[in-house]
Amino acid sequence: MSEKLIAIFSGRSTKYLGEKIAESYGTKLGNSDVTVFADGEFRTILNDNVRGRDVFLIQSTFPPADNLFELLLMVDAARRASAKSIVAVIPYFGFARQDRKDRPRVPISAKMIANLLTAAGVNRVITLDLHADQIQGFFDVPVDHLYASTLFNDYLKKLNLPNLTMASPDTGGTRRAAAYAKSLGTDFVICYKQRAKPNEIAKMALIGEVEGKDIVLVDDIIDTAGTITKAAELMMENGASSVRTFCTHPVFSELAYDRLVNSSFTEIVVTDTIPLKKEHKKFKVLSTAELFAEVIHRIDSKQSISSLFQF
């Protein structure tokens, strides 16, 4: 049997997920090292042969920025080692919240990241639940934009909630909540918020009926958890039977853990695109490993992956 011309490597921040993806695919994670110099500078080393191979590099780009730079160095290493193609598997695409100029003299960081990845030598990008769909258009290479609904819907159906209603914690997530509601055949409600400044809410109002309902708030990112926990309180104050949240990327910065643990949520369901710093009985983590492994398999075998785009 001929040797499989595929290699899967992972950066340091996503090694825990890279190992699971490689196992689900049916291979071992490629051998790589990072040499760190005394001043903090580092270099990546791919110890396995990648000449003529399709190389998949797995790394989420959450802070610190070293995670992004490590991915870029891995891409450059693979390109200079004559890889046939280089696919960046980015479970969490960092800097995605800066996707437009919303005031003078600010960067469009998501576009800059796309430029950096392309310049480094990426031929394709696989990612999950981008903060804004239009970021796909920032790339001049193919982008496979997957949705966590593939995982969340199956889990929701197992819960068998009697009065399920989907909800969005803000108007920006209306499309996402509506897509879940349509897929599951339920109603949905929306929270309307006004911010005093970034990460600080001045006022929040509810649009829709929640009394006696089992509410599931869906979002792509939970950062400080201020919005999502305030939305949960609003739902309970208006007579909801229970409130859960489904969030793809658990950024969980600052006071997020304490806010979530002490919140009205019955359950907080997230994926493993970002590792949890703390565990709690309220947190449920769904693995994305099989989803990414299936995409890698279909790309490698030249099969369609459109059926994996549930929403």
Image (spheres, helix red, strand yellow):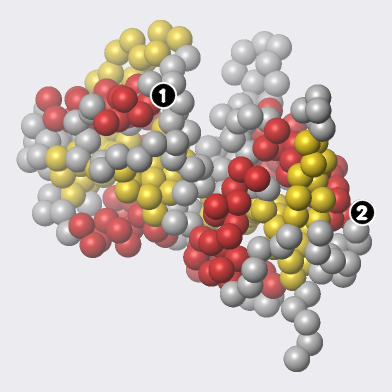
- Secondary structure under tag 1 reads loop
Q: Is residue 55 above or below residue 136?
A: below
Residue at horizontal 27 percent and vertical 23 percent from the top? 230
16 on left or right of 218: right
Residue at horizontal 41 percent and vertical 8 percent from the top? 196
Q: Where residue 91 sits: x, y (%)?
A: 57, 49
Residue at horizontal 23 percent and vertical 28 percent from the top? 263
Q: Few, some or many C-alpha atoms within 10 Å of disc 1 (few <14, some 14-19, many ≥20)?
A: many
Residue at horizontal 31 percent and vertical 43 percent from the top? 283
Q: Where residue 69 sits: x, y (%)?
A: 75, 36
Q: Few, some or many C-alpha atoms within 10 Å of disc 2 (few <14, some 14-19, many ≥20)?
A: few
163 on left or right of 181: left
Q: Where residue 301 sits: x, y (%)?
A: 68, 77
Q: Amino acid at mark 1?
A: Thr
- Secondary structure under tag 2 reads helix
User: Where is the N terminus found, in terms of image quarters?
Assistant: bottom right
205 on left or right of 197: left
Q: Which residue is mark 1?
A: 224
Q: Which residue is mark 2?
A: 80
**Is residue 40 visible in this depiction of the protein?**
yes
Mark 1 or mark 2, which has the lower sequence index?
A: 2
Instruction: Find the residue positioned furthest to the bottom.
Output: 1
